[in-house]
Image (cartoon, coloured by chain):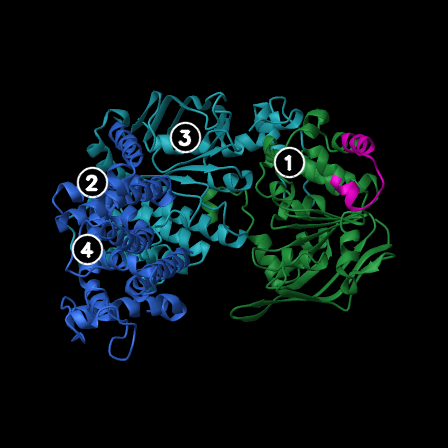
Chain colours: A blue, B green, C cyan
Amino acid sequence: MKVMRQHTGATVGVSFIVLLLLASLFAPLPYDPKATEGGASLQAPSGAHWFGTDGAGADVFSRVIDAARIDLSLALAGTVLSLVLGVVLGLAASTKGKGSERLVRGLDAFQAFPLLILALALVTLSGNKLYMVVVAIALINIPRYMRLLRSEVLSLRESRFVEAAMAMGASPRRITFRHLLPNVWGVVLVQTSLTIANAIVVIAALSFLGVGVSAPTPSWGGMIRAGAGNMSSGEWWIASFPGLIVLLCVLAFNQLADAIGDTTARSHR
Amino acid sequence: MSDELVLDVRNLAVTIDTPDGVVNPVRGIDLQVHRGEIVGIMGESGCGKSTTVKGILRLLGPNSHVTADTINLVGKADLAHASKKVMESIRGRHIGFVAQNPFGSLNPIYSIERQFYEVQKAHKTGAKKAESREIALSMLKGVGIVAPERVLSGYAHQLSGGMAQRVVIALATTLGPELLFADEPTTGLDATVQAQILDLISGLVRTENRSMVLVTHDLGVIAQYCQRAVVMYQGEIVESGDVMQVMVNPQHEYTKKLIGSVPKAEGRLNVAR
Amino acid sequence: MSLVEVDSAVKTFASRVRGRDPVRALRGISLHIEEGETLAVIGESGSGKSTLGRAVLRLLDLDEGSVRFDGTDLGGLSPHAMRAMRADMQIVFQEPYESLNPRLTVGGIVSEPLEIHQPRLKTKEIRRQVLATLDRVGLPGDAARRLPGELSGGQQQRVGIARAIISRPRFMVLDEPTSSLDLSIRAQILALLAELQEDYKMAYLFVSHDMHTVESVSDRIAVMYLGEIVETAPTSQLFASPDHPYTQTLLSARLSADPRERHAYQSYAGDLSVTSPASA
C-alpha cells in the first residue's frame, strides 16, 4: 500500500479501473444500453443523456459503461493466458540447451509476422468467436513475456546467489522456483500491467475493424467505428467518449506499471 | 620536506542535503601539507576521507555545502571562498587529482592524445597540437610507458587498469601542479601493479619537490609511502602525526584497533585466539 | 589419501571478444589438500585462481584432468550423485551481498542446505539448527527474520558462512572471503573462519590476492601465475625463501603496515603490465 501513497497517478488510475468495472457489473444504468429510441437519436450531451445518444438513439453513457464488462474481461483473460504461457515458455527458453536456442529462433521467426493482422485473420476465420480474441491477445503478448523472462533469467543465472544454490546442491527445479522466479516477479508484474493496456487497445482495434465483439453488444472499438461517420457532421460525442475511455484505461495501466517498476527497483537495493 | 606550507585547511566541514534531512559526513578538519611531503589520510569506508578531499577540491555534488575558516592554497587562493571559475583554473594547473577508477577519469570517446590537448586548451596555455603531443609523449615516458606513441593514438578501453592509471597520472601532472591529490589510486589493482604505480607517483613527488595528499584504506600504503598520517573516523580526524609515530606508537584507541586488525604472520592458529 | 586431489586440470574459455585468443585459465594444475588443513592459492587477476576454486567444487567442468574428493572422481558422478556430494563441500564468496538471494530472509537462506540434504528434518529441528548456526557465526537470533539488504557487509558475510557450515562440510572453498570488507571486519571474519576450522575439522582452499591475509591463515601456499602453479610451499618456508622469481616479485610488492619494514619492489620478467600496453 506504500506504493499507492507515493504514486498518485497509479492510485487514481487503479481507482478509475475498479470504479469502471464495478459500475459495469453492478450499477443500475440510466438506460438500457441496447435499447434504441428512434426519436432521440443523435442528441448532444445533456442532463438527460450525459454523453448524448448515438445514431440508433441509444444512450452513449450507458453503452460506454456496459462495454467495460466485456472489453475488460477479454483483456484480463488474454493477459492471464499470455502471462501463464509466456512465463512457462520463457523459462524453457532460458536454459542452456540446444532446445532453448531453437525456441528462440522460432520466436524470432514468429515475431517477424505482423501480429495484429494474424490476430485479425484468426478471429475472422474462427467465425468471430470471442475466445479467439483471447487467443489472439496471447499470441501477440506471449513473445514479449518470453523475451523478458529469458533476458532476466539468463542474467540471474550468472548471479552469485544462484551459483551459491548450485554449490549447495540445489536441484534445477529448486533453483527455478526458489531463486529465479521470485526475482523476476517484479518485472513480470510490470509487463502484465502493460499487457493489459495493450490488450485493451488490441480488442478495441479488432472491434473497430468489425471482428470480435459484434453489435448490438456494446464495445468501445465498435462504438468508435459506429460514431466515426458522425464526426464529420459534428456529432463528435458518439466516437469521442469511448475513445476517451480507452485512452484513460491505457493511461491507468501504464501508471500502475510505473509504480510497480519503481517499488521493485527500490526493494532490490 | 621543508617547513614551507603548501596547503592549509582549517575547520573544514561538509553538509549534504538528503531527502531524510541534512547530514554532516565531515566535521572540523584541519589539514596542513608542506612542500615535498606526502600526507596520507586513512580510515575505513564511510569515515569521510574521500568526502574531505572532494570538499577541498569542491568536487562534491550540488546538494552539498563546504564550509571552512580557510582552505589556503598558499600563494594562490583561498579555496574556501573561490568562485567556480577560479576553482576550474586551479584544478589541473595548481592541483592535480587522481581518482580511484582511472576509466572514470578518462573520456571513452576521445583518443588519449586528444585528452592531453584538452587539458592544454582548458587552461589556455597556448600550446598547439604538435606541441601538446610532444609534451604528452614525454609525460607518458615519464610514467614508465614504453610505447607512448601507441598509447597516444589509442583509447581508454584499450588499456589495462594499471596502464590507464599511469595515463591519468600523466594527465594530472601535465601542467606541473605543485600539489597532487590521489584518492585510493591503486585500490582494485593487482599488488604488483600497485607497487609500480605508488613507486612512480611518489617518485614524481620527490624528484620535483611537490606535495601529495594520498587517501587510502590500506595501512601498508600509508606506512610505506607517506611521511605524515591522518587517521579519520566517523567524519573527524582522531589522530595525526609523523608516520613512524602514528603507525608504530598510535595514541588513539581507534588507530590502535585498526593497526591491530592487520593480519599477522603468526600462523593461523593464533588468529583464533 | 588426501581429501582433495586435483590432477592435471585444464580449462580453457572462449574469449568474450571475438577474434581474441581463448583464455587458458587452468593449464595443467595438480594439487592436494589434506583433512583439516588450509591450502592458500595466491595469484593476481587473470591467474586462474577463482576458476580453480570452482573447478575443485565442479561448479564448472574441466576440459582435461580430474578432481577427486575423498577418493571419488567427481567428473564420473551423475548430476544427482554430485548434488548429494555437495553437503560435504561448500563455498564462501567474495561478494557477500551478491551471494545472498535478496528475496529470502536470512533464516530461509541458511536453512536451505538442510532442506536439500536432509529433507525429512522437521521444521522445528531446522529452526533450531538455523538459530544455533547463526549464533555460532556471531549473529543474533532475530537476524533470521531479516532480509540480506538490511545487514552490514560483515553480517552478510557471516550469513554466507552460516549457510556454508550448516551441512557440516569437510571442505570449503573460500574465494576471497574478506576482500570486500573493511580491515577491522576482515580480522573478525578471519578469526571466525579459523575457529570454525578448529571446531569442525574442515579443510580450506583459501583463494586470495593478498599476501598478508594468506600469510596469517594458511598452512601451505600455492602461487598461481597465468593458469599454472609456479610454486607450492609451507607458508613460513615460502615467505622465508621463495623459490620462483614470480613469488619473489609478489613478496616484494607487499606493503607492510609497519613503516620500519621496507621492501623494494622488484619486477618480474614475465610481468606483462610493465612493458607493453596490455591487451586485457
Screen quadrant of the C terminus of chain A? bottom left
Q: Are marks 3 and 4 on the same chain?
A: no
Q: In this view, does B35 lie to the left or right of B164?
A: right
Look at mark 2 in the image and give the residue it sits on: A121
Verify whether residue A38 appears in magenta: no
Circle 4 Cα neighbour tier, 10 Å, few/some/many (<14 / 14–19 / ≥20)? many
Look at mark 4 in the image and give the residue it sits on: A74
User: Where are the magenta residues, as a range?
Assistant: B118-137
Q: Which of marks 3 and 4 is in front?
A: 4
Q: Nearer the viewer, mark 3 or mark 1?
A: 1
Q: Do labels 3 and 1 share a chain?
A: no
The answer, for residue C19, to whether it is visible in the render is yes
Look at mark 1 in the image and give the residue it sits on: B164
Circle 1 Cα neighbour tier, 10 Å, few/some/many (<14 / 14–19 / ≥20)? many
Identify residue type, mark 4.
Answer: Leu
Q: Which chain carries label 1?
A: B
Magenta stretch, overall SS: helix
User: Could you tell me how far apart the alpha carbons at marks 1 and 2 are, in whole angstroms?
Assistant: 59 Å
Identify residue type, mark 1.
Answer: Ala
Q: Which residue is drawn at 20% across and 40% down?
A: A121
Q: Is residue A222 left or right of residue B42?
A: left
Residue A28: x and y, percent?
A: 16, 76
Look at mark 3 in the image and give the residue it sits on: C52
Q: Is residue B239 above or below residue B208?
A: below
Q: Mark 4 lies on which chain?
A: A
Identify residue type, mark 3.
Answer: Leu
Screen quadrant of the N terminus of chain A? bottom left
Q: Which of marks 1 and 2 is in front?
A: 2
